[in-house]
Amino acid sequence: MTRFGAAVRRTLSEVGPAGVFPVLVLIGLHGVERFDLVAFGVLGPEIRDAFHLTNAEFVPLATMTAILPLIFSVPLGRLADNRDRVAVSRWGGLVWGFTSVAVGLAPAIGLLVVARLLGGIGNTVNEVAHPSLIADYYPPRSLATAMGTYRFGGAFFGLVASPLAGAIGQVFGWRATFIALALPTFIFVVLTRRMIDPGRGASVGAEVINKNKNNIETEK
């Protein structure tokens, strides 16, 4: 236990002043969206039957709604480069949360398609904003750990999503599953209110500034 405690303290000391809170919130946003993507595949037969579709109709629909949002990756990337990335992530989470509810309530196939397309845009926000935020929150010595934890967290949510979505869908139905999925999304969105964008290059910029100050003081 002593060695374990020492390892934990050493890890926490290496993450820098940001602490573990930002990466945990980003993992949460990333995880619920991974859960949604897996759940849509697992509950696909129920969704297909609810809208009286054949496999030939449902499979292209599911593929299209997953791929088309990637078209927006470039403009979303530009947005994340020029705006507050925490705010961009927050709005992406809100879009995802509301579209998850919309999927559960969709009365017609057209509304389901629109909800999935908009939700895919929310997922794309994660890929363009979260990695750069992590890179600026955490110094180089802990960046690999922070980024690896973020990716592992998303993969873990995707892994448990399949049996969990199947179990919830079996008991409450596929619509309730997607509505319930929005609740943790909104919780993580609220938690982003406690985060601020650290600024581009913040994790190394502080060191550069300090070195410049030291050089100036030495010259004086």
Image: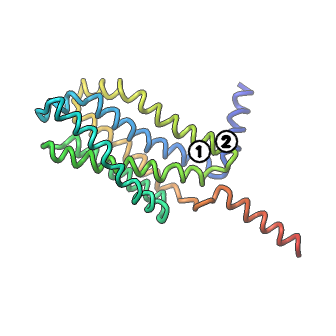
Lower sequence index among marks 1 and 2:
2
Assign a secondary structure to mark 2: helix
Question: Which image quarter: residue 62?
Answer: top left
- Percent coordinates x, y for residue 87 in the rendering: 44, 59
Query: As displayed, is residue 47 above or below residue 214?
Result: above
- The chosen color scheme is rainbow
Observer-nearest of 43 and 87: 43
Residue at (52, 43) in percent of width and height: 24
Observer-nearest of 81 and 160: 81
Question: Which image quarter: residue 160?
Answer: top left
Q: Distance between the residues labelled 1 and 2?
A: 8 Å
- Judged left or right of residue 42, residue 147 is right
Give the residue at the far bottom of this rendering.
Answer: 220
- Judged left or right of residue 150, residue 178 is left
Pointer 2 local density, CA inside 10 Å: few below 14, some 14–19, many at least 20: some
Pointer 1 local density, CA inside 10 Å: few below 14, some 14–19, many at least 20: some
Q: Which amino acid does label 2 sit on?
A: Leu
Observer-nearest of 179 and 137: 137
Q: Are marks 1 and 2 in contact (CB under 8 Å)?
A: yes
Query: As displayed, is residue 194 above or below residue 160?
Result: below
